[in-house]
Image: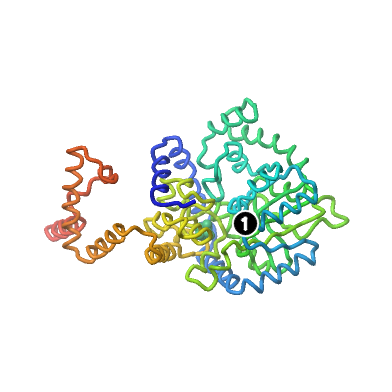
């Protein structure tokens, strides 16, 4: 599937024109931002902690091969089976083999963006295996047959009223719009799934090489159920989600929940080190860890290596003005917002996602909030350069960009352009002509910033 400018703009336009969607985003996004700001403000030296996390992530990625080998060795020593997969098909095959061997009919899943990336649910369902998402947001969008709109809040585009209607239609449950009541309905429906599932599949927030452990961070406890009640647990992990030791993991965890949801710690942090021991009261008999590459190692040593430092907190989404208006579905990728605009072309091919590097005002808000200080604007620009070099940008657009670059270097030309732009807008409005949506843009100001500045200086001189 190719996501060009038209597709991005069409979906974005639909979101912008849908008052229910806008209301849902307008409610969720400021909450993410203010919680993160409050949580960061409580850390004595948050900038120092961010620098530390950056250093830890950069050093790990620079020596990823060694850390992965250590992780594999220690995970095996703890009794886990470690699999390596280069691409989606291999992951599907590994999971299907395990499911067939266990004669699995029902799989309980906890939230995992990497399995979204690999379309794992579709692979399992087409083999006749029922898969049920158990994270509340994922459960809602699975019932609604939709895609996630946010990497940590997959159903933030849905209002409580819509969820209530969905539960009435799909679960035949009469329920109030109250979030607590809705959660209760989901909890009851999912309890049966946890108990009866043959296999639990989870993502991995981070792996720790030192002990071969996988760490899951959740707020609902479903991760713990999925990984401890079914007899088999399969953890699907991107190869970059690795901390060399528990010291590095502690730095990572101290910023993850703060950046994601504004919590000092998420409610549940589950550490899984191999299957249940003989004297454990519960836990799976088999633990499989699938280490997924899927174009990640191809970024190492390139100008995009930094993207592998991402801890998928979602802070850049809430900070991004484009995401806030266009919504997550406009990106047509499991990864939306600024991180999605960079990582989707890198993982799935720039030729398939040529619109996404353009979906940014390059305001820098994403860099400002990122707990790992990932320079997303730099990589968005680099992808734009690559797009032009690979012939993915139309010649008229390249010509327009060249003209605007020249004009921006000449203030006189800029003045002329804005003045004539205003006249053009007035003409379009007067004669009711549609021109690429230009007629809908806010009117170009009658006064330029330069004119305003001159007037302010003149006023100051007069007052002196
Ligand atoms: S790029 Fe930074 S802010 Fe965005 S999801 Fe990754 S770690 Fe979080």
Say above or below: 165 vs 51. Answer: above
Q: Decide if residue 34 is in sight here.
A: no
Please determine whether, in this image, residue 444 is positioned above or below residue 367: above
Say which residue appears at 46% left-offset and 60% top-offset.
350
The image position of residue 397, as x and y in percent, is 31, 57
Q: Is residue 44 visible?
A: yes
Crowdedness near tag 1: few (<14), some (14–19) or many (≥20) residues, C-alpha within 10 Å: some
State left or right for residue 252 relative to residue 456. Answer: right
Q: Which residue is mark 1?
A: 88
Please state which of residues 4 and 249 is positioned toward the viewer in this rendering: 4
Q: Position of residue 4 (x, y in %)?
A: 41, 52
Res 56 → quadrant: bottom right
Secondary structure type for disc 1:
helix
In the image, residue 1 above or below residue 408: above
In front here: 90 or 149? 90
- Residue lying furthest left: 462
- x, y (%) of residue 168? 61, 27
Side (left or right) of 204 relative to 40: right
């Amino acid at each position: 599937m190719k996501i060009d400018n038209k597709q991005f703009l069409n979906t974005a336009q639909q979101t912008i024109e849908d008052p229910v969607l806008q209301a849902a985003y307008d409610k969720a996004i400021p909450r993410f931002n203010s919680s993160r700001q409050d949580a960061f403000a409580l850390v004595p030296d948050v900038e120092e902690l961010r620098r530390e996390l950056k250093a830890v992530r950069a050093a790990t990625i620079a020596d990823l091969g060694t850390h992965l080998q250590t992780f594999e060795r220690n995970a095996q020593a703890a009794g886990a089976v470690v699999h390596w997969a280069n691409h989606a098909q291999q992951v599907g095959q590994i999971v299907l083999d395990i499911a067939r061997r266990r004669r699995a009919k029902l799989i309980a899943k906890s939230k995992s963006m990497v399995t979204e990336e690999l379309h794992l649910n579709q692979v399992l369902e087409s083999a006749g295996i029922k898969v049920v998402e158990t994270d509340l947001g994922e459960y809602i969008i699975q019932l609604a047959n939709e895609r996630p709109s946010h990497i940590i809040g997959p159903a933030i585009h849905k209002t409580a009223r819509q969820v209530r209607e969905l539960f009435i239609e799909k679960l035949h449950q009469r329920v109030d719009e109250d979030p607590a009541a809705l959660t209760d309905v989901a909890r009851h429906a999912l309890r049966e799934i946890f108990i009866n599932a043959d296999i639990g599949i989870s993502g991995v927030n981070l792996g720790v090489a030192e002990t071969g452990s996988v760490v899951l961070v959740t707020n609902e406890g479903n991760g713990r159920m999925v990984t401890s009640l079914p007899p088999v647990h399969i953890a699907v992990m991107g190869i970059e989600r690795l901390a060399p030791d528990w010291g590095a993991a502690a730095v990572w965890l101290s910023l993850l929940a703060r950046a994601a949801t504004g919590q000092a710690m998420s409610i549940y942090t589950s550490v899984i080190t191999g299957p249940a021991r003989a004297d454990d009261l519960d836990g799976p008999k088999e633990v499989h860890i699938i280490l997924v590459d899927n174009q990640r190692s191809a970024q190492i040593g390139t100008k995009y290596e930094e993207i592998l430092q991402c801890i998928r907190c979602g802070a850049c989404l809430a900070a991004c003005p484009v995401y806030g208006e266009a919504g997550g579905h406009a990106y047509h990728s499991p990864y939306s917002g600024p991180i999605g605009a960079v990582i989707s072309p890198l993982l799935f091919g720039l030729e398939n996602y040529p619109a996404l590097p353009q979906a940014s005002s390059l305001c820098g808000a994403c860099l400002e909030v990122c707990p790992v200080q990932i320079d997303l604007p730099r990589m968005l620009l680099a992808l734009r350069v690559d797009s032009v070099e690979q012939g993915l940008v139309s010649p008229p657009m390249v010509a327009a960009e060249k003209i605007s670059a020249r004009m921006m270097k000449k203030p006189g030309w800029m003045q002329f352009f804005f003045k004539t732009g205003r006249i053009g807008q007035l003409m379009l409005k007067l004669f009711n002509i549609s021109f690429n949506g230009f007629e809908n843009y806010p009117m170009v100001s009658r006064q330029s910033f330069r004119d305003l500045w001159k007037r302010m200086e003149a006023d100051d001189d007069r007052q002196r």
